[in-house]
Amino acid sequence: MSRIPAAAKRKAIVWLSQGISPRRLALTLALGFAVGCIPVIGIPTVLCAALALSLRLNQPAIQAANYAAMPLQLALIVPFVRLGRWIVPAHSAQLLAPRVLEHFSALNLAKNMGGLAGEALLAWLIAAVPAVLLMTVGLNLMLRRIPILKAAEAGD
């Protein structure tokens, strides 16, 4: 017995047969997944929408990839912060110690956390560029095997 209902399969076939080529769909999914891993919560959905509008990509596809990446986004926050602190060593490592946090004013704490977020974003950017390239190539090769998308390839 199939785990995917027949209605969902029909909707997916209609969605995939709307003239999008495997190359553009691969780029859309790769960008959505990579942006979905940004180490700042709340940013990816808006950024995916803006990317899809500006690059004329498939909005549902980029958002689906974005939402699929959400668990990975949460798991990668700490590694991106650590990588960012390693890339930008001027930021003090003592910042996250509990005793140090007690002595910060709210403004100073916000400034330092903003610095950590900026460093994490830099680390994400360095990792995301090659990841998007690799995912686009891999997804393109996989999506070209789908007959419906193969027919749409001539139109792109």
Image: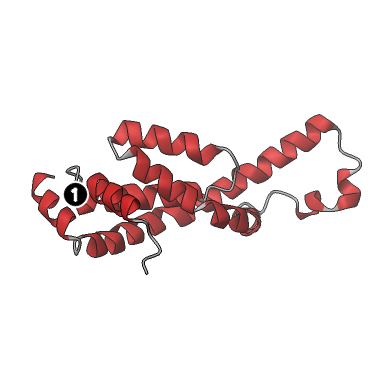
Looking at the rendered structure, the secondary structure element under dot 1 is: loop
Image quarter hosting the N terminus: bottom left
Relative placement, left or right, of 153 versus 110 is left
Residue 125 in sight in this render: no
Q: Nearer the viewer, residue 52 or 110?
A: 52
Residue 156 picture location, percent across and down: 13, 45
Q: Nearer the viewer, residue 155 or 105?
A: 155
* Extreme residue in the front direction: 1
Residue 97 picture location, percent across and down: 84, 53
Relative placement, left or right, of 60 versus 44 is left
Residue 49 picture location, percent across and down: 41, 34
Q: Nearer the viewer, residue 75 or 93?
A: 75
The residue at 20%/42% (across/down) is 18
Residue 5 picture location, percent across and down: 37, 56
* Extreme residue in the bottom direction: 1
Q: Quadrant of residue 2?
A: bottom left
Relative placement, left or right, of 65 versus 7 is right
The residue at 30%/40% (across/down) is 58
Q: Which residue is mark 1?
A: 21
Q: How is the image coloured?
A: secondary structure
Q: Callout 1 environment at 10 Å: few (<14), some (14 to 19), or many (20+)?
A: many
Residue 88 in sight in this render: yes
Q: Quadrant of residue 56?
A: top left
- Amino acid at dot 1: Ser
